[in-house]
Image (cartoon, helix red, strand yellow):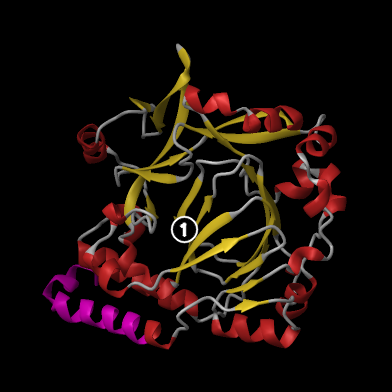
Amino acid sequence: MIKRMAAIDKERIEYGLLRQMDIQNAMYPSRVPVLIDPPTDLEFSRLVHDNFPALFKQAGSTGFAALSKWTTDYLKEKLRDCPVKVAETPFGNADSPLHDILFVKPHVRTVSGDQMIDLLMDDSKKNEGIVRYMQSQDNNFESEFAPLVEDALLTIPWAESVLQSSPEAVNLWIGKGDTTSRLHNDNYENIFVQLQGRKKIYLIPPGDAYALDEKFLIDATYVYDPKDPLKFHIQIDDEHEPIKVPGSATKDMLEQISQQYKRSRIMFPTVNPADSATFNPIFKGHCKVYKVVLEPGDMLYIPSLWYHQVEIEESSGLCISLNYWYPVSPLAPLWAKWDYIRVTSALLRGYHDNQYFD
């Protein structure tokens, strides 16, 4: 069936994708709606039905003692005996594309909680070429940060009421500056709560996937060079033995590796909404991009499958967030539409991965 597509007029297929993007985006609001108080069950159920984000200003003022209690001294004392996983990268680019060829995960090491806070607050570490971020995303709030659980909610009452479920995961994020979680999406209803510092978040609807130039990237990981702990190299797990390349590897070097790579790849957006150098004509002409800034006490509803990129705004203190992942009904119709757009986009651009299509 896939081979027959070569005989189909690709321009007409592309026209169909662009038309649905333009119709969808013409109906969307020009801005993310802002509510001053937490939503009622009816208000939130309408947002979920419409699959559209919303910002709730100061909605976290109730139930989150963390807003006032989580100073650096308090966190160090509470987390002194807690082993926590810290992501380390050269550029604050964990889980990100590199030269549109690799998808590079961070080097992860385990330290005590108080040591993590010291490492994050030590600005001299920037000069050593190491950017750290606590971002394990594996329901870490209860498992790794148990002493802090009393300072925040384990569910958002109005979200649980409407979604008829407790969250599958509650994740704590702690960082400082120079860190970006690159554009991606999740198959969860996401309630994002800002507790300390400020974050800038870009939001793009799932129907605009064609504009994001998702490519099949090679799975890779940053690893310390044992001869120089202040420099990274990149490890690629291939069929027989790992391939190691320098962290400064050029695009030409990585393209040679890509031609020989046999394993399945990761389909991931290569557009960075904060970097115009990554924009393609479809993104420039058709994509709907929203931008919000979260301050302490704010909550953001990120609907399932919405693409989002999260950036820490530079400050002298820590930037701390919690997010709550609520499950999505397997009958939700948006999944099929989004998957169709992604697959069609890859075929139109001539991208292929044997394990993905065969």
Residue at the (55%, 70%) spot, across then down? 304
Q: How many marks?
A: 1
- The magenta region covers 1-23
- To which quarter of the image does residue 251 belong? top left
Across and down, in percent, residue 71 comes to 78, 41
Across and down, in percent, residue 105 comes to 47, 40
**Amino acid type for the residue under numbered disc 1:** His
Residue reaching furthest top?
227
Residue reaching furthest right?
150
Across and down, in percent, residue 13 comes to 21, 79
Across and down, in percent, residue 48 comes to 61, 80
Which SS does the magenta portion mostly show?
helix
Q: Residues within 10 Å of mark 1 (few under 14, many from 20)?
A: some
Q: Is residue 151 above or below residue 348?
A: above
Q: Secondary structure at mark 1?
A: strand
Q: Which residue is mark 1?
A: 184
Q: Nearer the viewer, residue 143 or 197?
A: 197
Q: Nearer the viewer, residue 77 or 81?
A: 77
Residue at the (33%, 59%) spot, across then down? 214
Does 11 appear in magenta?
yes
- To which quarter of the image does residue 78 belong? top right
Does 245 appear in magenta?
no
